[in-house]
Amino acid sequence: MPTLTREPDSTIQSGPDMPPLDVIFGSTPAMQTVRAKLAQAAATNIPVLIRGASGTGKEIVAKLIHRNSPWGNGPFVKVNCPAIPGTLMESELFGHEKGSFTGAYNRKSGRFASADKGTLFLDEIGDLEANLQAKLLQVLQDGKFSRIGGEHEESAEVRVISATNHYLEEDMGTGAFRQDLYYRLDGISITLPSLAERREDIPHLAEYFVQHYNAAFSRRTPSFSPQGVKKLMDCQWHGNIRELENVIRRYVIFGQEDASLADIKHHDTLTYVPEISLEGDISLKQITRRAVRELEYKVISRVLLEHHGNRTMAAKALKISYRALMYKIRDSGIPRLRNISPKQAIAVPEEEVPDA
Ligand SMILES: Nc1ncnc2c1ncn2[C@@H]1O[C@H](COP(=O)(O)OP(=O)(O)OP(=O)(O)O)[C@@H](O)[C@H]1O
Ligand SMILES: [Mg+2]
């Protein structure tokens, strides 16, 4: 593949479906380095390897490079390496001829061909199986490939961007990842900092997500209070920007700052400590009833979010009838959350989107 370049240009553009650049890069030195490298990478079509922990923005960076590259108007084709096993992955990448394996009912072209004059984004490249690593290396060397069962070689001009959260040096040490492939992929290397390494950017990111989800869900949830912002800046954020975004989406939907922030450090568990006044007469019955209602509110809200607002699935998960769940939603005052379209629900990564 010929190397395509244009003058490096530091004025990269964001896109309509992306946060503005001042949000993406913030003001920390670590992200300014990323910005400069991204501009360099965008000016050429040599392979880029993006490294960083989960949720640090590897896909956003890949899309920005593509959009600002000489082939920015061409296709951006993503392949999620661990999601597709064995032969299917080979077919996914290079295509197959009809009848070349069980289940190959039709001739199909692969993602490499689809990415011609564009970008192929190989996500989680560290999980690619050994035989496919060898095939990928070959394609990167001569730009030619064959469909499974195919007799002819095909070619495509493809810029490859790969991403990983593996420590590939270690994988090469154990033989799990080919060294020659690594050097092919690592034309320009961009390493994304964790959110903890760019804490100063958290207030700006938080404000952006509040505005963004207010607009998306037609809410008017206010910005975080100064104490709320401080709490956001103090957290661990093992899930990085994705985790921050999820917390803020939940806050915008429910509008309760304290409750949203109380959950942060215990994301996968649910902690509930009822406040019980021991003054005057203590009605155990009343206390128990109130505690149960509060706990139900928390659990139902969480399960609804986890099932994208689908009440049938939430009822199943909670092992109660649909009708019982509806009564509980009504009685506990959980918001109806009817403003979220299925499209928005799909656009949300892992967790939570209420009601369709
Ligand atoms: N710099 C950023 N500014 C604003 N939002 C960001 C930024 N980086 C990531 N995000 C948001 O965080 C979420 C995760 O980003 P992305 O999918 O790019 O991360 P990733 O590194 O590919 O994560 P994973 O390893 O889990 O696939 C997305 O919703 C994205 O919009
Ligand atoms: Mg990703």
Image (cartoon, helix red, strand yellow):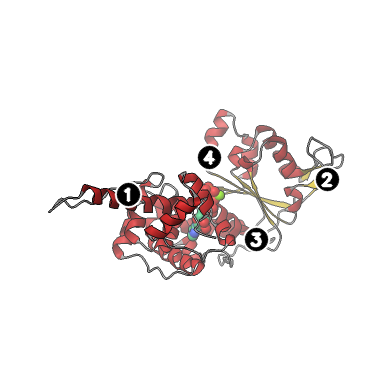
The residue that mark 2 highlights is: 107
Q: Earlier in the sequence, mark 2 or mark 4?
A: 2
Do residues under tags 1 and 2 come within 8 Å of each other at their CB atoms? Answer: no
Label 4 crowd bin: few (<14), some (14–19), many (20+), radius 10 Å = some
Residue 79 % position (x, y): 65, 47
Residue contact between numbered discs 1 and 4, judged by CB atoms under 8 Å? no
Image point (65%, 36%), residue name: 180
- Taking the spot 80% from the left edge, 35% from the top edge, the residue there is 101
Label 3 Cα crowd, 10 Å radius (few <14 / some 14-19 / many 20+) = many
The residue tagged 1 is: 292
Residue 175 horizontal/vertical position (percent): 59, 29
For mark 3, give the secondary structure: loop
Q: Residues within 10 Å of mark 1 (few under 14, many from 20)?
A: few
Answer left or right for 322 relative to 101: left
CA gap between label 2 and label 4 equals: 34 Å
Dot label at residue 166: 4
